[in-house]
Image (cartoon, coloured by chain):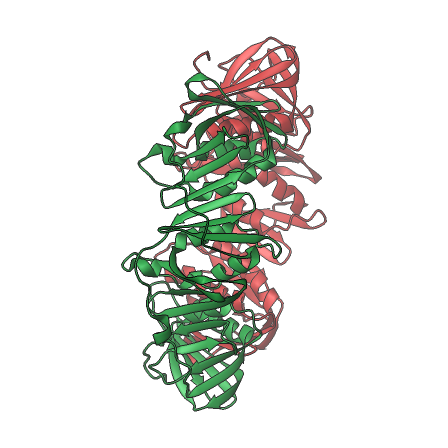
Chain colours: A green, B red
Amino acid sequence: MKLSFLKTDLLNGINIVLKAVPSKTTMTILECILIDATSGEIKLMANDMELAIETKVKGEILEAGRIAIDAKIFSEIVRKLPDSEVLIEEYGNETIRISCEKANFQIVGKRGDDFAFMPQIEREDYICLSQFTLKETIRQTIFSIAANENNKLMTGELFEISGNSLRVVSMDGHRISIRHVELKDYYEEKKVVVPGKTLMEISRILTGDQDSDVYIFFGKNYILFEFDDTLVLSRLIEGKYFQVDQMISNNYETKITVNKREFLDSIERSTLLIRESDKKPIILNVKDETMELSLNSFLGSMREEISIEKGGKDLMIGFNPRFLIDALRVIDDEEIDVYMINSKAPCFIRDENQSYIYLILPVNFSTPR
Amino acid sequence: MKLSFLKTDLLNGINIVLKAVPSKTTMTILECILIDATSGEIKLMANDMELAIETKVKGEILEAGRIAIDAKIFSEIVRKLPDSEVLIEEYGNETIRISCEKANFQIVGKRGDDFAFMPQIEREDYICLSQFTLKETIRQTIFSIAANENNKLMTGELFEISGNSLRVVSMDGHRISIRHVELKDYYEEKKVVVPGKTLMEISRILTGDQDSDVYIFFGKNYILFEFDDTLVLSRLIEGKYFQVDQMISNNYETKITVNKREFLDSIERSTLLIRESDKKPIILNVKDETMELSLNSFLGSMREEISIEKGGKDLMIGFNPRFLIDALRVIDDEEIDVYMINSKAPCFIRDENQSYIYLILPVNFSTPR
């Protein structure tokens, strides 16, 4: 095998597939990136058995072949090469030479045939949306997946397609995040749970371009994302996701409209008084035209007042400030509406046409001084 | 006590004195920043008993007084406040209110009188140089102080003044860094060893301005740096520093002139093949017009050739690549001269008028394939 690349093209490809290289594994072949130049194109691949990524790289095939190279050393070497033409040659014995101007490295690779290739999936059932929309939707929901694996389904996100609507849902037992996206076409009904890790890695690879599309193909146990020159294949999480609609209600006793920036800044400041292990709630005291925010911890206390518009009853309610911050950070509206029933029932942050719904459970609090 | 500041002024002052707040200590008063507004000016102070910093902050004294506040929580709160006027008030019981626009924090402080104040030193014996020169000189030498305390003197830097010349020296047993600085005035002879930690913290505070001066005062066991509105006082390291002049020689058998950037880039690439615990040398093979650099490790091998001008004998010599990198990074010359005697004797990187001298010991190596 003998290939020639521009350093930037090669490095760009490496950075994409690196997302599927596991940091710890007992199978050393999984720590490798496969360079495959057997089909007239140059492809890089990596596969951690849950997630597999393949991307095409511009370059010249001087001699066809394929070889696997340790991802860490390969990416570090290429990153440090001069910004010029890079030559990758394989001799016998899986010895690989990487050269660029005067730089000259020799490392030992692994047989390409030992690599764990991607399973093939049928490309029949699919949807299409812009890179921008997918990247944004992931960002706006990913924070409320569950971190631990006690409930496997909660570590993923529900992708639910019905007609021209895509609904993405995540929940962790304390909160639910829902985003509705209108698609350009109409599709068959589908419901799958995509691993959160897959979505995080994809959103790092997506450029977020408005004019560039992502095709998402649905297989029996797999989902395939295709965009630019890249394929990302992931296992799905098996099982039936929670009945989200039963958890959502449009009733309320108190509705407030508040400037998002002011609300968020104030909550963020309150967290200065919280040390990691500490679980102090922020208490919202909703009155006619103002809301008082207060927090007491062993470090001190804070108290702020912000202007609101209120409909319905006065209310005092406590929240984990982190959960409010997570939701507010991903809402782009300048003014937001918060709907509440009482101090024990979940609050809903949602816009009028429900393009987003953030449900957050309140926490108990002792009445402040 | 009641004081009013602009947030940026206060934060700037806090960031300066924070450098003298110890991260771990059993004396909680040392974790505090003292706000002292008893003398018609507002001063912030911190003191870890080795290093003490005092800085003046612009602000209005509405009521004189002084109080100590936990540095961590104080700095975090001020950092998060809106960019506006900050009011700090002390009530009885060391309760402190920090308010800014609608934000309102209450925390408990400590009695200002319990604070460990700076010792006074006589301001007779001093030198003066620009902030730029001091900051640069520290950067160009600090990397070769010893990290561990086995030899206390090696954890500091020698500051040696003679006439209008300041010589700064650091060494760690494998290498020596020397910088000569010409001062604007003539001073009495002085020789002190300044702790490396002090110099690192000072260089972070110095703006590096060409037109702004630093006065350095020499006391019996202390050194005091005065610049802008800030005083930094540090203990000196006691003892007699090493006889540097005996370690330096102007003899050589081989002299090379090489482009610094090319040399540095090549050595940096070689370190890609080295994992932390590994101690592989880079081998320089000096011939008539070229120098070959090579490194072999269990990860692979690299070999590069760069153009040089050579005087004297051919030579093959091995170095810890890290030591070459550290020295080359702080030399601003485009072309550098390296002087060598044989593969067992130290090499010297120095300019013609010896404004800098970097001595590096070679390491043994097995002859490469």
Is residue B242 visible in this depiction of the protein?
Answer: no
Is residue B332 visible in this depiction of the protein?
Answer: yes
Residue B152 vertical placement versus B26 (above, below): above
Which residue sits furthest top? B313
User: What x and y, as percent, mark residue B232?
Assistant: 55, 52
Position of residue B23 in the picture relative to residue B217 (left or right):
left
B19 vs B125, nearest the viewer? B19
Residue drawn at the location 63% of the way across and 38% of the way down: B188
User: What x and y, as percent, mark residue B153?
Assistant: 45, 35
Residue drawn at the location 57% of the way across and 71% of the way down: B82
**Residue B48 appears in which quarter of the rendering?**
bottom left
Residue A236 vertical placement versus A255 (above, below): above
A197 vs A36, nearest the viewer? A36
Residue A251 vertical placement versus A111 (above, below): below
Which residue sits furthest left? A150
Marker count (numbered): 0
**Residue A59 appears in which quarter of the rendering?**
top right
User: What x and y, as percent, mark residue B266?
Assistant: 57, 26
Residue A310 vertical placement versus A173 (above, below): below
User: What x and y, as percent, mark residue B337?
Assistant: 65, 21
Residue drawn at the location 55% of the way across and 30% of the way down: A40
A103 vs A6, nearest the viewer? A6
B7 vs A30, nearest the viewer? A30
**Residue B329 appears in which quarter of the rendering?**
top right
Q: Quadrant of the C terminus of chain A?
A: bottom left
